[in-house]
Image: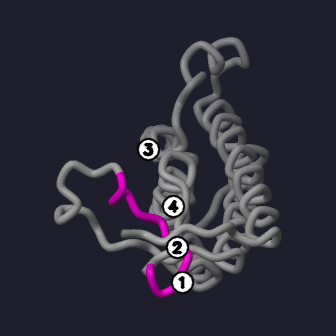
Amino acid sequence: MIATREPSQEYHEALGEFIEFFAIVEQTVFDALQAISGVSDATARAIFNGTHTSDGMNLLKRVAEANPNFKHEKQLEIMAIHLKAITDVRNDLVHYGSTFSPNGEQVLTRARRAFRPEKLPPPKRISSRKLRFMTEDLAMIASFLIFWSARQLENVAPQEDQKNADDLKRSWKYRPA
């Protein structure tokens, strides 16, 4: 049985910021898709409207692959992997909420609704600190996407892309378990 209690105000504030920044990244993925694919605003709205973040990142990778002038493939891959981890947390928060384990840790789990709880991954600890770390990482992802949208044809050497990708990976504050 999972114990329940009320999360702190600090947690709720961090959760609100996290959800808001996630929405900003969703919009930024849309904007980057439009810019990097080179389609008009009307065409982007027709094609990309309703695209979920993970699907949008996959589309961005495909569009970047098709665009010989896009030189940030490694950075894009690093961001896509990290954004997927954050998206998984966001989806669990939005669709299942958090609860408290018997030892008092706030966790994300699907156990209360699962048909076969034994097949579920273990609960993930969540805290206002982790939410703030993910929010900072989302802000960094949005910044990169905005930069690419504005300067996507910039000529970058492959070794510079690799160095920037390595730097990006080291800079993440949220570390999935």
- Say which residue appears at 65% left-offset and 35% top-offset: 30
Region of the chain picked out in magenta, as a range: 102-112
Pointer 1 with pointer 2, Cβ within 8 A: yes
What distance separates the C-alpha of mark 2 from that of mark 4? 16 Å
Position of 118 with respect to 38 (left or right) is: left
Whichever of labels 3 and 2 marks the residue nearer the N terminus, that label is 3
Position of 158 with respect to 160 (left or right) is: left
Residue located beneath label 4 in the image: 89
How crowded is the residue under tag 3: few (<14 C-alpha within 10 Å), some, or many (20+)? some
Residue located beneath label 2 in the image: 100
Q: At numbered mark 2, what does the secondary structure look like: helix, strand or loop?
A: strand
Q: Which mark is residue 104?
A: 1
Q: Which mark is residue 58?
A: 3
Specify the amino acid type for callout 2.
Phe
Specify the amino acid type for callout 4.
Val
Specify the amino acid type for callout 3.
Asn
- Say which residue appears at 54% left-offset and 43% top-offset: 53
The rendered magenta stretch, by its main secondary structure, is classed as loop
Quarter of the rendering containing residue 123: bottom left
How crowded is the residue under tag 4: few (<14 C-alpha within 10 Å), some, or many (20+)? some
| Picture layout, residue 167 above or below residue 74 | below
Pointer 3 with pointer 2, Cβ within 8 A: no
In this rendering, the label closer to the viewer, 3 or 4: 4
| Picture layout, residue 151 above or below residue 158 | above
Q: At numbered mark 4, what does the secondary structure look like: helix, strand or loop?
A: helix
Tell me the quadrant of the picture where the N terminus can be found: bottom left
Q: At numbered mark 1, what does the secondary structure look like: helix, strand or loop?
A: loop
- Say which residue appears at 46% left-offset and 57% top-offset: 88
